[in-house]
Image: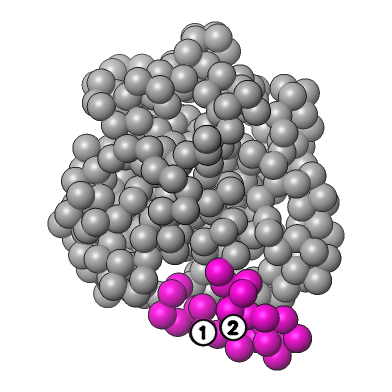
Amino acid sequence: MAFVRTLLGDIDPREMGVTYSHEHIVCRPPYWAERGEDDLLLDDPEKSLQDVLLFVQAGGRTIVDATCPDYGRDVAAVAEVSRRAGVHIVATAGLNKGFLWSARRPGSEETFAEWVDRMSIRDLTRWLVEEVEVGIEGTPYRAGQLKFGTGYNSIHPLEEKVLRAVARAHHETGAPIHSHTEAGTMALEQIEILREEGVDLRNVSFGHMDRNPDPYYHLKIAETGAYLCFDGIGKVKYWPESTRIACILELVRHGHERQILVSGDTARKSYYRSYGHGLGLDYILRKWVPRFVEEAERAGFNGRRLVKLFFEENPQRCFAFKKGA
C-alpha cells in the first residue's frame, strides 16, 4: 500500500490535494546566518504560519518542505505550523549542497564538510534511514523524502558520497528522492551515479529545472522517467514566466506531462508576504495558475487538466513510498 509520510503521520497519497513540491517554511541556514544574510533566514514561525494560511485559503493542502540540516531545518516549528494551519507538510532528510558545508553544525565545533568527510557512506546511510523510519534529531517527526545536491557544473567527492548514501537509504526505506541541481546543472551526471546505485529514476525529482531553461536537457532527464520540478515560479530575476511556461509546454508536447511538478522554493523573507511584503505562498495558485491555463489553452492544451496533474496527481505518485524500489 503506497503512502506519503508527513510530519504528523502517514497519509494516503489521495489525501494530498493541491501540493507545492518544493518550499521552505522555517529555516535558519548556518552558512547564511554566519554571514549576516538576514533575508535568507525564515526565522519567525508565526510569520511563516501566516503565509501558509494564505496557501490554504487559496486551495492548497500539502507542502513539501525541502529543508535539510545544512539549511537550518526546524522540524518542531514546522510541525506546529502544520497543526495550526491544518496542512500536510512533508519533511526532508539529507543534505543540500557542498558550499553550505563550511558552516558549523549546530551544537558542534565541526563543520558539515568535516562531518561528511569522516562519516562512511554506511554511516550516512544509517543516519538517513533513522531520520525516515525513527525520527529527526531526536524528535518523533519523520522525514518523507531524501535529498542530495551538487554544485554549479560540478560534483564534489563529498557531494557524491551523500548522493550514494541517499540512494542506499532509498533502497532500504522506499522514500522518494529529491535532487538539488545548482542553477539547474549536473542532473544528467547525477543520473549516471544514481543508475550505478540501481535507483529507478521514476522515484526521483530534480529541482531547479527552470534555472536552466534548455528543452533538450529537460527532455533527456524526462526520458529517464524522473520528475522535473519547476520551482522558481515568481522569480523573474532569473527568467520570465513565459520562459518557464514554454519549457513546461515543450515537455507536454513530448508526452511528459505526468512528470512535471511546480512550486516556488520560497526561501527568502522578501518572497513571503508576511515577512517582506513579497508575492506570498498563495501567488502560484492565485496568479500563476490562471496565466498558465490561459497560455496552455492558447497552445491547444487542456490547461486545467495539466494543472490538476502538476499540483495533484503527479505529487501523489512522486512522493509516495515504494518499498522494495
Q: Are there few (<14), some (14-19), or many (20+) residues within 10 Å of tag 2?
A: some
Against 121, residue 96 (above or below) is below
Q: Which residue is mark 2?
A: 293
Residue 299 is covered by the magenta coloring: yes
Write the start and end of the magenta stretch as one range: 284-308
Q: Residue at x 52, y 16 (%)?
A: 125
Q: Are there few (<14), some (14-19), or many (20+) residues within 10 Å of tag 1?
A: some
Query: Quick check: can you spot residue 319?
Result: yes
Return the x and y of residue 82 as percentages of the image width and height. 25, 50
**Horizontally, is 304 left or right of 102 in the view?**
right
Q: Are marks 2 and 1 in contact (CB under 8 Å)?
A: yes
Q: Amino acid at mark 2?
A: Val
Q: Secondary structure at mark 1?
A: helix
Return the x and y of residue 254 as percentages of the image width and height. 83, 65
Q: Which residue is mark 1?
A: 290
Q: Amino acid at mark 1?
A: Pro
